[in-house]
């Protein structure tokens, strides 16, 4: 079978190779991959900016949808012919994350979805709703589950609340859609007026350009008549501005650190965040780290998506020239 294999770090070292088809062991399933989608995290793996202990070679990319074509001994949750996605951490079924559960992620510790067939754990896959196309199902995986975990599972989002999402990447757009479906209003930040306009078309309440409004936290505060937002989806690592935009007792879901990351540099990211501790203290700020989600969150998310037939926002699709 064909697979894209990362043999050394760096995008130029992603190589199309022939591999033997994987065989599922006890408790595992074999999938024929139908579609895959890309995340910022995939580039971090490729450029050695994600896990200092990353093994090579590895087939990257965590998000994808596949058809079950073979079952290992003892698998009963799914059947041959089912269309499924893999949970990001194959050993994290429910409850709180542990290091042991985390070190089972697809496209890092497990070979990922840039191959014709992949073997995953039978307990680590989730059936996708029939209304989603293969491309949509592939996109509605890690990014969607992360937004769902932040806002709904851990954030207990309520109708009438205000959510601030940073940027217009996958997690942010799913957060926008989930928040709107729950009856919340959404403010989006971006460096692009065109992307803000697109977010407004999707239903965002307001947008703030953080280039023309460098003190965007204060700008968000003004939009909410000084009250502040209830929840921030923090993708950039700009905690100081996020806290400025937050209401007293509000929640920041720390998901990303894109402002700290330079993929073109050989230097490791600094992970330094500017935060006024006194302001955070006086506002009774709540901060939670969100790293993907357990399988049970994928299941509840897909049930909710199916109820309203919510569809991912797809920027563009690419079909492999190598595919028959």
Image (tube, rainbow, N blue to C red):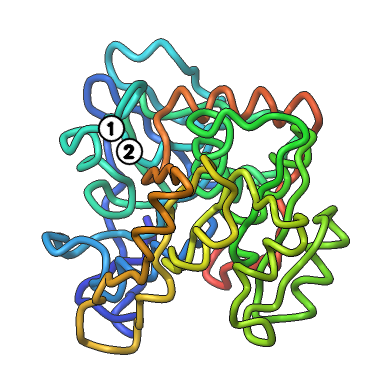
10 Å crowding of disc 1: few (<14), some (14-19), many (20+) = some
Q: Is residue 166 above or below residue 302?
A: below
Q: Nearer the viewer, residue 65 or 300?
A: 300
Q: Are dots 2 and 1 in contact, CB under 8 Å? A: yes
Q: Nearer the viewer, residue 238 or 119?
A: 238
Q: Nearer the viewer, residue 252 or 15?
A: 252
Q: Position of residue 49 (x, y in %)?
A: 26, 71
Residue sitting at 65 percent across and 65 percent down? 168
Residue sitting at 55 percent across and 45 percent down? 248
10 Å crowding of disc 2: few (<14), some (14-19), many (20+) = many
Q: Which quadrant would residue 200 be assigned to in this image?
A: bottom right
Decide if residue 291 is in sight here. no
Q: Position of residue 63 (x, y in %)?
A: 47, 50
Picture quarter with the C terminus: bottom right
Q: Position of residue 284 (x, y in %)?
A: 44, 43
- Spatial distance from mark 2 to mark 1, Cα to Cα? 9 Å
Residue sitting at 57 percent across and 68 percent down? 320
Q: Which residue is mark 2?
A: 89
Residue 97 bears which disc, if any? Answer: 1
Residue 111 located left or right of residue 219: left
Q: Secondary structure at mark 2?
A: loop
Q: Which quadrant would residue 216 be assigned to in this image?
A: bottom right
Q: Residue furthest right?
A: 201
Q: Position of residue 179 (x, y in %)?
A: 71, 41
Foreground mark, 2 or 1, reads 1
Q: Is residue 229 above or below residue 221?
A: above
């Amino acid at each position: 079978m064909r697979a894209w294999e990362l043999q050394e770090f760096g995008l130029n070292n992603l190589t199309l190779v022939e591999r033997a088809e994987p065989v599922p062991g006890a408790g595992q399933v074999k999938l024929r991959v139908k579609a895959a989608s890309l995340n910022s995290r995939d580039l971090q793996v490729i450029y050695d900016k994600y896990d200092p202990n990353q093994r090579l070679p590895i087939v990257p990319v965590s998000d994808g949808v596949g058809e079950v074509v073979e079952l290992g001994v003892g698998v009963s949750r799914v059947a041959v012919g089912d269309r499924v996605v893999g949970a990001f951490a194959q050993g994290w079924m429910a409850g709180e994350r542990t290091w042991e559960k985390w070190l089972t992620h697809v496209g890092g510790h497990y070979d990922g979805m840039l191959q014709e067939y992949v073997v995953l754990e039978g307990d680590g896959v989730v059936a996708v709703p029939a209304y989603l196309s293969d491309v949509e199902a592939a996109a509605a995986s890690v990014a969607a589950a992360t937004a769902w975990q932040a806002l709904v599972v851990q954030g207990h989002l309520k109708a009438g609340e205000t959510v601030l999402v940073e940027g217009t990447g996958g997690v942010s757009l799913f957060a926008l859609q989930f928040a709107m479906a729950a009856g919340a209003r959404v403010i989006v930040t971006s460096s692009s007026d065109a992307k803000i306009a697109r977010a407004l078309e999707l239903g965002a309440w307001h947008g703030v350009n953080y280039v023309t409004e460098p003190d965007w936290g204060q700008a968000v505060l003004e939009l909410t008549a000084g009250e502040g937002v209830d929840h921030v989806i923090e993708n950039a690592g700009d905690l100081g501005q996020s806290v400025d935009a937050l209401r007293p007792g509000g929640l920041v879901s720390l998901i990303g650190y894109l402002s700290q990351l330079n993929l073109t540099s050989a230097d490791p990211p600094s992970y330094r965040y500017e935060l006024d501790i006194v302001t955070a203290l006086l506002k009774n700020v709540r901060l939670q780290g969100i790293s993907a989600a357990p399988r049970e969150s994928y299941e509840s998310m897909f049930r909710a998506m199916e109820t309203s037939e919510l569809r991912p926002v797809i920027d563009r699709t690419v079909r492999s020239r190598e595919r028959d």
